[in-house]
Amino acid sequence: METILFLAFTEADGSLAKPALETLAAAQSLVAAIPGSKLVAGLIGAENQPAANAIAACGATRFLGVTGPEFAQSRYATDAAAAEAIAKAAAATIILAPAGSRANRALPGVAQRLGGRVDTHVTALAATAGKPAITRWYYRQRMEGTLSRTVRPWVALLESGCAAAYAGAAGTATVEGVLVALPTIRTEVVGQKSPPADQQTIRPDAKLLFVAGAGWTKKQPDGQAHAAEAEQLILGFLGKAQASLGSTKSLVDLSGEGQTVLTFMTHLNQVGQTGATPRHQKGLATCCHGEEPHAVGWRFINERRAINLNAACSWAQGKADVLYVADAFEVMRKVNALLG
């Protein structure tokens, strides 16, 4: 019999983020597919009761929690100690967690402490003949593999966007507190600094992904580069459409080559086999050719469109649903004007 532990870190207000709710829904499906298995919910954070109440109807047989100011912030020592304590209290054989920064950093070490195994970047959970299995990508996301393990506990970190989020009714849950022997804390969080909301360019929940290629910084028909105008057009569109920003590797690498760059672009925006693999509903590529290393990152975009002056570019070879053969500067000026 499998004891499946849903493990999540709560937000500052005690709630659960969307990736955690997606993992919970996946855990429910796995429990339903494995006869005799049971679900246990484990929560870590400064406050856990709001999160427990929000998922009270999820079917968990127990709600375990580690609370306190020491667990409010991401820190390997405290996160790993809390996760280990909950896993032992639950006697978990399978541990499922959302692949956020905290879980990705702490849970591999927890699996080692428990004598188990861990798999990251999981994209699907299933069970065949009552045996659990995971799906993930290999070889720079060119091959998909399904695997299972006999070693327990088995820790699996589920990528965001791979399952529908849990949407059950709220209620009142009884959370069992789990005592943790605090390790020596060598770090102190003195505050947080983040850009204003209107300056945020990476929006995982946005419906549209706007990708900028190196063509934005190249010479235009007048023989001059117009990087400043490119920045205004791109940021103007992102602000009005609340889209997320992606980039090709060639564009983010320009800063190291001494060429004109877009000041707000970093490697965090990179999409492709060496970057991110986003899961937005729609994608619009501009001033890039759609080469395979870049286009591979678009495999989960439902509707793909591109703007390029070259009618024979790779986007036209079946990689885009619609290709607009046009000047991206002219198109985006018009689009921004229509958006007001």
Image: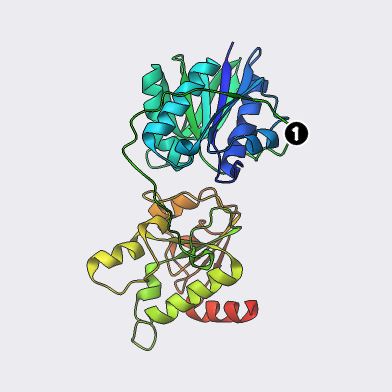
Q: Amino acid at mark 1?
A: Gly
Q: Is residue 288 left or right of residue 172?
A: left
Whether residue 278 is visible here, answered yes or no, is yes
Residue pictured at 60% horizontal, 41% vertical: 16
289 or 103: nearer the eye? Answer: 103
Residue pictured at 33% horizontal, 41% vertical: 187
* SS at mark 1 in the image: loop
Instruction: Establish if 137 lies above or below 329.
Output: above
Residue receiving disc 1:
171
Residue pictured at 30% horizontal, 75% vertical: 260
Whether residue 92 is visible here, answered yes or no, is no
Instruction: Establish if 248 lies above or below 42.
Output: below
Q: Position of residue 175 (x, y in %)?
A: 63, 26
Q: Is residue 192 left or right of residue 19?
A: left
> The C terminus is located in which quarter?
bottom right
Instruction: Establish if 15 lies above or below 202.
Output: above
193 or 264: nearer the eye? Answer: 193
Q: Is residue 311 left or right of residue 4?
A: left
